[in-house]
Image (spheres, rainbow, N blue to C red):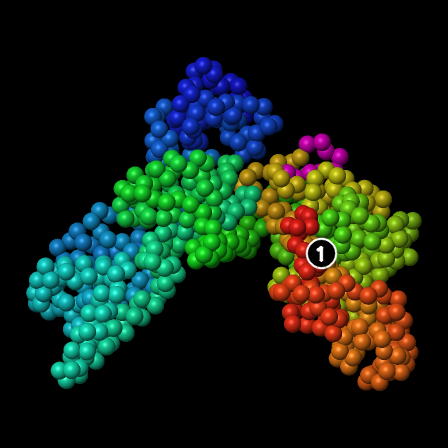
Amino acid sequence: MADPSSYRPKPGQIPDSPGVYKFRDEHRRVIYVGKAKSLRQRLASYFQDLAGLHPRTRTMVTTAASVEWTVVSTEVEALQLEYSWIKEFDPRFNVKYRDDKSYPYLAVTMNEEFPRVQVMRGHKRKGVRYFGPYGHAWAIRDTVDLLLRVFPVRTCSAGVFKNAARTGRPCLLGYIGKCSAPCVGRVSDEEHRELAEEFCDFMAGRTGTYIRRLEQQMTDAAEEMEYERAARLRDDIEALKKAMEKNAVVLADATDADLMAVAEDELEAAVQIFHVRGGRVRGQRGWVTDKVEAVTTGDLVEHALQQLYGEETGDSVPKEVLVPALPDPVEPVQEWLTERRGSNVSLRIPQRGDKKALMETVQRNALQALGLHKTKRASDLTTRSRALEEIAGALDLDSAPLRIECYDISHLQGDDVVASMVVFEDGLQRKSEYRRFQIKGFEGQDDVRSMHEVITRRFRRYLVEKERTGEWTDGENASGDGTSGDGAPTDGTSTEGVPLGNTTPEGDTTGNAFAGNAFTEEDGRPKRFAYPPQLVVVDGGQPQVAAAKRALDELGIDDIAVCGLAKRLEEVWLPHEDDPVVLPRTSEGLYLLQRVRDEAHRFAITYQRTKRAKRFKASPLDEVPGLGETRKQALIKHFGSVKKLRSATIDQICEVPGIGRKTAEAVAVALAQAAPAAPAVNTATGEIMEDEEVGTSGTTTGSPEEPVTAGASHERRGQET
């Protein structure tokens, strides 16, 4: 590891002008290329205290052994030179987008004597018209097959073309009318080139002219009673319309634009681009990259623009490029794009209307691409095994942690404090064993104390189960009283840890909390919830890790490892350690820990939102023991509203089918003790609703959504954690 001060240039040596710089390692290989408006200011930022640098930047400057730079006259030249050097040297610390596939294009070889329509991949060739890219080659072939009825352009290879010319017999497409057969002289080279030009015009979006012309020809043929020719023209029109339907109109006024969206996490980013030509989505492509340097979304956009348009000129660069974030500064990038196109290019963020709506679609595609990339990576057995081994090595464990449990705390400004426990076995989710907790040992917001309570409650039950099965007989540390150390109930109900025997695809509960022993199957065998993990992961840094370790120590458990993953810099914290463990950026172990932590956070915040919604929708009838949802609805249906039910006598309540006198008395007492609800508000009109219009949930009967008071999002009420 090199000391950056050993190769730091003197401040007076670095010019205060635009330029491009290269960091080289001890073997003179270029490991990073960057550009700067001021070389002096930018390079000085790399040679500060290492503790103040981003971990990825710190790794780069300690790997490098020298730095050099080239002065240019403008920021646009710096952008161009940076792109050229990245392509030439392929530096390991630069963001490099890699195609998730080699995208096919529909190409028309206008540089040949007889232009040919075909599928092409790879670098673009001079004199060839390209349309796309398309997601699949079969999509191109389907489109071409439809258009050849109207534009019978050559599609055969050079060998087939020469053989047909030699024998004087065209191929099958020539016999069925899907090729004009220039190989045997049915049309001249000028006529065939005109067909190719019309084909290109149609693909470029100028479709109305050809449709109207064919419709007029069909009408004329019908008037002249040439019905067979009219039928062929009708079929040609249908073929063109079908080809047009494959690319639906998404933007008005024949817009030419590229829309780019970015989905990212701490280590990776996915970029998706939609190519809109003539108001229609003509193609789509995407990249995935490792974030090997400290970059913002604007930086990712700038690198993607270089990748996308670095080799393009003219109409291949659209008039408008829509992005999720602008590079800083944006002017050089916009000027560079304008130079590539030869006319003005607008680079901006869509704010409203159809373009913003389409950008949201592109963003969803980017998120899906990143998720699919992660899923492929996580499903590989070899990768999972390597991840577990890396975790064991980094945390100095005796063996790979085959069972990992992760805990997270969630609340909204100290209200509805809950916790989640997720389980990963062999690197894969075990959603049937997820648990969720309500924090009831204290009131208010204290993540550290909440973490201590959750770990205590979960592992106290583990010790109870060990004692019950005879695996552990020392009763000093195990409490069989069914409570945690602070009196929180641990009876297996939803106040402790709700089991998830039935889960949705997202892992959310669809069943009810169970009563009795939370760790016993019907046949008496212990549930896997009673099994100890090899590793406990908490979402947080040193304080949360210390709380979890203290809880285990108080219970006398010393054979379970504990660590925490701090989200800000993805550092792994261990108990009693002042410095974190920093796993390499490419570490599969770090990637697995991130997945575990993110899943625990998702599960906790889902439960917290569910609890909050239920609390806002609470009704006085919820407090009546033994009164289920069916009989509550029957009461409301019979009386029409809570207000009328509150004024009813016990005898009138007993008239409702299924309601006995004891239950009626309980209902009357509950309604008498409950304060009248605040007036409900119609969220659509702002009117205060009469009680007759309001059901037990406090929402208007015309809308299934939460009332205004319940609908306050975390943006308005505070940060949700």
Q: Is residue 574 magenta?
A: yes
**Residue 24 seen in this snapshot:** no
Asked whether, in this view, residue 82 is left or right of residue 699, the answer is: left
Q: Is residue 272 visible?
A: yes
Q: Is residue 700 left or right of residue 33?
A: right
Q: Which residue is at the far front? A: 687
Q: Position of residue 358 (x, y in %)?
A: 44, 57
The answer to whether residue 449 is left or right of residue 503 is right
Q: Is residue 205 inside the magenta stretch? A: no
| Residue type at the position of mark 1 | Gln
Name the foreground residue: 420 vs 359.
Answer: 359
Q: Nearer the viewer, residue 6 or 83?
A: 83
Q: Is residue 194 above or below residue 593?
A: below
Q: How many marks?
A: 1
Residue that numbered label 1 is attached to: 608
Q: Which residues are magenta?
A: 571-579
